[in-house]
Amino acid sequence: MDHKVTFGGKPVTLVGNRCKAGEMAPVFTVIDAGLQPVSSDVFHGKVRIFSIFPSVDTPVCSLQNIRFNREASKLGDDVVVLALSVDLPFAQKRFCAAEGIDRVHVFSDYKELDFGIKYGFVIDELRLLARGVVVVDKDDVVRYVEYVPEITHEPDYDKALAVVRELAK
């Protein structure tokens, strides 16, 4: 299935391997606020929401992080939210402190684009991640994927959260 994605109405090219519901979730490594590598394996056994966005320094990305932070407090200990962008960890840390982001694990894919390539979210023209949401179950199976068609729009929170609530039962 071809996913057309635009940024400000202009088509962009996403590179990497598009993930699909039903596939095994690829393991990836990203960078934490302390500039240390973190493998997605550390969250094995939990339902995972990957909240993907271009930059914390934009209004829609800010809203997305604030919304998932608020939702994370309602989802219980078996669910973890990972916020992923190519922002430098310094910018992510500043943003989280300013906005009170404390229930979401924020990671940077700036170094290797390991997540972005393995999940097909890298915007070729900008070397940023496109906006989207991926939900992975406790057994590492992808259960929901959204590549937001227009990057300046918010994801469909309700659809993703409905899948998460079903998996967390």
Image (cartoon, rainbow, N blue to C red):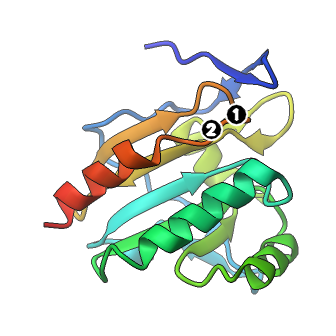
**Residue with the mark numbered 2:** 121
State whether residue 29 appears in this view: no
Rendered residue at 62%/56% (across/down): 64
In the picture as drawn, the residue positioned furthest to the left comes out as 169
Rendered residue at 45%/48% (across/down): 157
Looking at the rendering, which quadrant does residue 43 occupy?
A: bottom left
- 90 relative to 84 in the view: left or right: right
Give the amino acid at mark 2. Phe
Residue 115: where, in percent of width, then height?
59, 52
Q: Is residue 18 above or below residue 6?
A: below
User: Quick one: label 2, few (<14), some, or many (20+) residues within 10 Å?
Assistant: many
User: Quick one: label 1, few (<14), some, or many (20+) residues within 10 Å?
Assistant: many
Q: Report the quarter where the C terminus lies.
A: bottom left
**Local secondary structure at mark 1:** loop
Residue 75: where, in percent of width, then height?
33, 73
- 158 relative to 70 in the view: left or right: left
The circle on residue 151 is 1
